[in-house]
Image: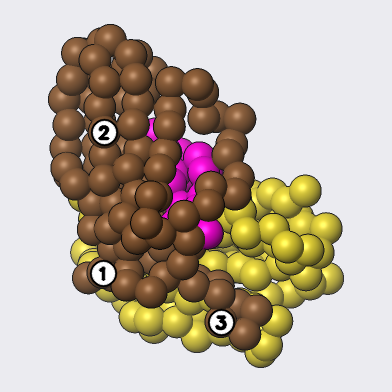
Chain colours: A yellow, B brown
Amino acid sequence: AQSVTQLDSHVSVSEGTPVLLRCNYSSSYSPSLFWYVQHPNKGLQLLLKYTSAATLVKGINGFEAEFKKSETSFHLTKPSAHMSDAAEYFCVVMGGGGSYIPTFGRGTSLIVHP
Amino acid sequence: DTGVSQDPRHKITKRGQNVTFRCDPISEHNRLYWYRQTLGQGPEFLTYFQNEAQLEKSRLLSDRFSAERPKGSFSTLEIQRTEQGDSAMYLCASSVETSGEETQYFGPGTRLLVL
């Protein structure tokens, strides 16, 4: 069984300040983990993924995430928020053991103030 | 543009009518997934295909829902006798497994409103 918990439904930051979106996962196997972003009326876009290589993963648009097995976390960060980062962010876990079915978190809405 | 396309982008229908959605995956992606997303929630898995074979279906997929991928390329999702609770965004994604890794690429979705 696998599950993912996004700890904040909304995160509000000022433009130019750091972003932290939190994600904890549960998986019986060594999972693959993903962050997707969804802008209004747009499809889901892959930001970054972890698949058992380097634990610090760099993605597009300056985002990165660190896989911490001991904490079962995969938090998404960005040093400096931009207005265009305002969107819904989804953490996704896809377990090993032959399972191809991903589980999505409920999403975190990132609000960026000027 | 991820390359996955879905048609139509929006559909309004009356309760009890049948609707059909189409998904065209990225060329040579052998896996195709359908999801449903309601407001304020993450996408929920419905079903997936590997080539033309439907390998798994969620318990969310009632008997009124049927999906096909006849030639292992495009896929259709049909909902019969629609209900107001079927109103949602229906997402399609495609992928191919490479060296034990898989990444899904999503289409823009079909937004269904059942009146």
**Alpha carbons under labels 3 and 1: distance apart:** 18 Å
Mark 2 chain:
B
Asked if residue A76 shows in the view, the reply is no
Do circles 3 and 1 both sit on a common chain? yes
**Would residue B6 appear left or right of A1 to someone viewing this image?**
left
- Give the number of callouts: 3
Q: Main secondary structure of the magenta part?
A: strand
- Residue bearing mark 3: B98
**Alpha carbons under labels 3 and 2: distance apart:** 31 Å
Above or below residue A40? Residue A66 is below
Mark 1 chain:
B
Assess whether residue B40 is covered by the magenta stretch.
yes
Above or below residue A67? Residue B45 is above
- Disc 1 marks a residue whose amino acid type is Gly
- Residue bearing mark 2: B20
Q: Residue A11: x percent and y percent?
A: 44, 54
Mark 3 chain:
B
Mark 3 or mark 2, which has the lower sequence index? 2
Q: Residue B28: x percent and y percent?
A: 38, 74
Q: Secondary structure at mark 2?
A: strand
- Residue bearing mark 1: B3
Query: Which residue is drawn at the image coordinates 16% and 37% (left, top)?
Result: B10
Q: Secondary structure at mark 3?
A: loop
Q: Nearer the viewer, mark 2 or mark 1?
A: 2
Query: Residues in magenta?
Result: B32-50
- Disc 2 marks a residue whose amino acid type is Thr
- Disc 3 marks a residue whose amino acid type is Thr
Q: Quadrant of the C terminus of chain B?
A: top left
**Would residue B16 appear left or right of A75 to someone viewing this image?**
left
Q: Residue A58: x percent and y percent?
A: 50, 85
Q: Secondary structure at mark 1?
A: loop
